[in-house]
């Protein structure tokens, strides 16, 4: 189409005006597809006027360029907007190939164009389009879409037409690249500051918002940080699965929104943990009363996957400005308070932060780091306390008791580090080390003529119930060539609290391998009689607290008598722990206890000392110990 100089000048002027308008809109930080809609429609209208086209449309690709979707269309009054709003590569292969190979697609007669034959027939039915000119919208990620001009009358497109539509498509490239970048930035910001499961803030957003509030807080106002966790989260995951767990977390987040005062800030952090910051006027009693009401509402049942779910919560509290000066410290202090409360129980616990808690936490963290290092540096030792036949005083075996030869604190008993090992997961590594050392000692004793001795090892509930535990025992048997009957596995009654079905399965596996099972501290835990009824075991060890008072306390003596009578009827071996006096020994002998363990015969000894003692026995290899009183350690019986 020939154009006069005046028309060309008008075209250039309109192009410059349109570019300026697009630039003005696109530079705004709040740019959105909706805010650009009117500007893009105006652009299409101007292109239609300049190109003398009946219809101008913008089409955008999906990510993998398999679909083109109509984004916006301007059409003259006499021309309909097509009902087809999406084109699929599988249905229009030739067309998709053509637009992928050439920047400009110029078609004078659509009816004779091979590529357009694959178009849906309905696209051209409503309006008899004859000619088409389109240009690719080139974006940073590749071809992002098309700018398309269509005419009803046949049209031979000029080079100027092609240059103009390409220039217009380039303007659109700038706009859509900008929109994509802003969308990506918004998504990144959302991920960085929003919890994707519940839709509430995450820890980053919480810290920023609360610190901003604290800076603007009027004099005299106070704030409460509440670090809250669900008590039954592991059970929820097991019963409801991932989707049910997410649903429950969403319900809890919504309840927190509705229950706490307006202006409170919430965040979900670390699976089932939530942090809340709420301002108050300094009246602690009112604040605690309000918290009681909130917890009551939170505990109301919720329906998840057609199941009625009852939850309880534990929480720790820190106060601004009494305890902390910013949000980060508030979270940390409230978490320390929560952890401290859990030492008294696992559910429905609460505690307000005290500076002494931080000192204790710091000490535990230091011990935790040293504990891992102690394993690496081989700082642990096994001490052995003899177990003796009550009537003959013949040594039958020993109990292996771990000690930590701390480089700074000296020899530490388990009481100083076992709880830390339990909470950090190092207990499994420590337990495996103990078993390996015991197996090595059994092998060595066999070589020097002490093969009749047994070694009892304490196994933590966590370690005993681990699915790898039986495999590990089998590996030790092969490596050290030990008779499994010589290694007695001691567990406590409280193991059954974890999962009684799993305990039963694990006991059966271990016993089938030939290892005897002994119940340590019998009578103090879960339920002694149910334990004996359900689980197949070979030995019970009477707890030292009953033995200690046997001489003076009738109830203690009656309990010991009952345990021994029950064990005898069930054909169980019995060991009394903590025997320290001749009077205790005589009572145990009279009541029929098989074996004695305690300071009356020997304290726990390092292997070198024990070996010397055993090998020096005048009736070796038949080992008998003289009765003797040994000065107690501070950690008696550990």
Image (cartoon, rainbow, N blue to C red):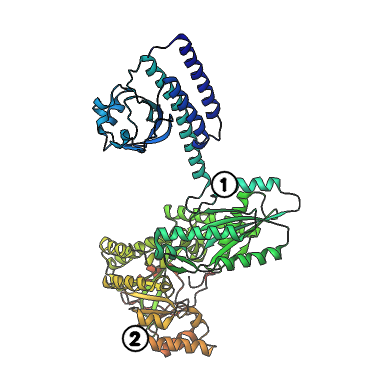
- Residue 390 percent across, percent down from the top left: 40, 83
Q: Residue at x 47, y 80 (%)?
A: 579
Neighbour class for label 1 at 10 Å: few (<14), some, many (≥20)? many
Neighbour class for label 2 at 10 Å: few (<14), some, many (≥20)? few
Compared across the picture, whether 291 is left or right of 488 comes to: right
Q: Residue at x 52, y 29 (%)?
A: 26
Tag 2 residue: 570
Q: Residue at x 51, y 30 (%)?
A: 39
Number of labels in the image equals 2
- Residue 465 percent across, percent down from the top left: 37, 67
- Residue projecting furthest to the front: 78
Classify 18 as above or below 61: above
- Residue projecting furthest to the right: 219
Q: Dot 1: what SS?
A: helix
First reached walking from the N terminus: tag 1 or tag 2: 1
- Residue 442 percent across, percent down from the top left: 31, 67
- Front residue (pair 208, 575): 208
Quadrant containing the N terminus in the rendered view: top left
**Residues tagged 1 and 2 counted as in contact (Cβ below 8 A):** no
- Front residue (pair 544, 62): 62
Tag 1 residue: 205
Q: Residue 592's image quarter?
A: bottom left
Q: Dot 2: what SS?
A: loop
Compared across the picture, whether 133 is left or right of 216 comes to: left
Q: Residue 609's image quarter?
A: bottom left
């Amino acid at each position: 189409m020939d154009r006069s100089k005046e028309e060309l000048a008008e075209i250039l002027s309109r192009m410059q005006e349109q570019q300026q308008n697009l630039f003005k809109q696109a530079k705004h930080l709040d740019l959105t597809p909706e805010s650009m809609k009117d500007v893009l429609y105006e652009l299409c209208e101007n292109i239609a006027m300049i190109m003398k086209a009946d219809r101008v449309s913008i089409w955008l690709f999906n990510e993998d360029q398999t679909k083109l979707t109509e984004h916006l269309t301007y059409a003259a009054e006499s021309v309909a907007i097509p009902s087809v709003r999406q084109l699929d590569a599988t249905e229009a292969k030739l067309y998709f190939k053509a637009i992928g190979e050439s920047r400009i697609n110029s078609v004078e007669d659509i009816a004779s164009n091979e590529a357009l034959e694959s178009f849906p027939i309905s696209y051209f039915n409503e309006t008899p389009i004859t000619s088409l000119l389109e240009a690719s919208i080139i974006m940073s990620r590749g071809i992002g879409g098309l700018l398309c001009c269509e005419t009803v009358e046949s049209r031979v497109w000029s080079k100027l037409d092609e240059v103009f539509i390409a220039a217009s498509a380039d303007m659109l490239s700038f706009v859509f690249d900008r929109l994509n970048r802003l969308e990506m930035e918004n998504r990144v910001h959302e991920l960085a500051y929003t919890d994707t499961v519940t839709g509430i803030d995450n820890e980053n957003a919480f810290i920023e918002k609360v610190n901003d509030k604290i800076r603007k807080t009027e004099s005299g106002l106070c704030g409460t940080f509440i670090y809250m966790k669900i008590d039954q989260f592991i059970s929820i995951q097991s019963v409801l699965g991932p989707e049910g767990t997410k649903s429950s977390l969403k319900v809890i987040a919504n309840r927190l929104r509705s229950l706490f005062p307006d202006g409170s800030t919430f965040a979900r952090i670390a699976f089932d943990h939530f942090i809340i910051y709420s301002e108050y006027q300094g009246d602690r009693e009112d604040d605690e009363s309000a918290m009681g009401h909130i917890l009551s509402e939170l505990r109301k049942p919720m329906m998840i996957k057609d199941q009625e779910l009852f939850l309880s919560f534990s929480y720790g509290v820190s106060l601004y400005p009494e305890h902390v000066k910013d949000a980060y410290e508030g979270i940390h202090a409230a978490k320390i308070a929560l952890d401290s409360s859990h030492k008294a129980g696992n559910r429905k616990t609460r505690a307000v932060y005290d500076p002494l808690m931080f000192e204790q936490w710091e000490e535990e963290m230091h011990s935790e780091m040293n504990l891992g290092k102690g394993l690496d540096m081989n700082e642990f030792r096994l001490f052995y306390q003899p177990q003796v036949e009550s009537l003959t005083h013949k040594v039958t075996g020993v109990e292996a008791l771990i000690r930590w030869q701390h480089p700074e604190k000296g020899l530490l008993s388990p009481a100083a580090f076992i709880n830390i090992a339990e909470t950090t997961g190092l207990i499994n590594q420590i337990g495996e080390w103990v078993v390996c050392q015991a197996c090595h000692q059994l092998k060595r004793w066999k070589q020097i003529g002490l093969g009749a001795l047994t070694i009892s090892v304490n196994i933590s509930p966590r370690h005993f119930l681990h699915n790898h535990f039986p495999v590990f025992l089998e590996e030790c048997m092969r490596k050290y060539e030990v008779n499994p009957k010589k290694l007695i596995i001691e567990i406590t009654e409280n193991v059954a609290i974890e999962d009684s079905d799993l305990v039963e399965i694990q006991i059966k596996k271990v016993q089938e391998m030939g290892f005897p099972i002994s119940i340590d501290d019998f009578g103090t835990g879960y339920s002694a009689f149910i334990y004996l009824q359900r689980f197949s075991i070979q030995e019970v060890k009477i707890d030292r607290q009953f033995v200690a008072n046997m001489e003076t306390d009738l109830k203690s003596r009656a309990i010991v008598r009952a345990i021994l009578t029950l064990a005898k009827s069930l054909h169980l071996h019995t060991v009394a722990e903590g025997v320290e006096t001749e009077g205790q020994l005589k009572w145990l002998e009279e009541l029929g206890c098989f074996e004695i363990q305690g300071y009356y015969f020997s304290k726990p000894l390092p292997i070198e000392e024990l070996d010397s003692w055993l090998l020096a026995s005048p009736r070796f290899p038949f080992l008998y110990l003289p009765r003797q009183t040994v000065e107690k350690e501070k950690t008696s019986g550990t």
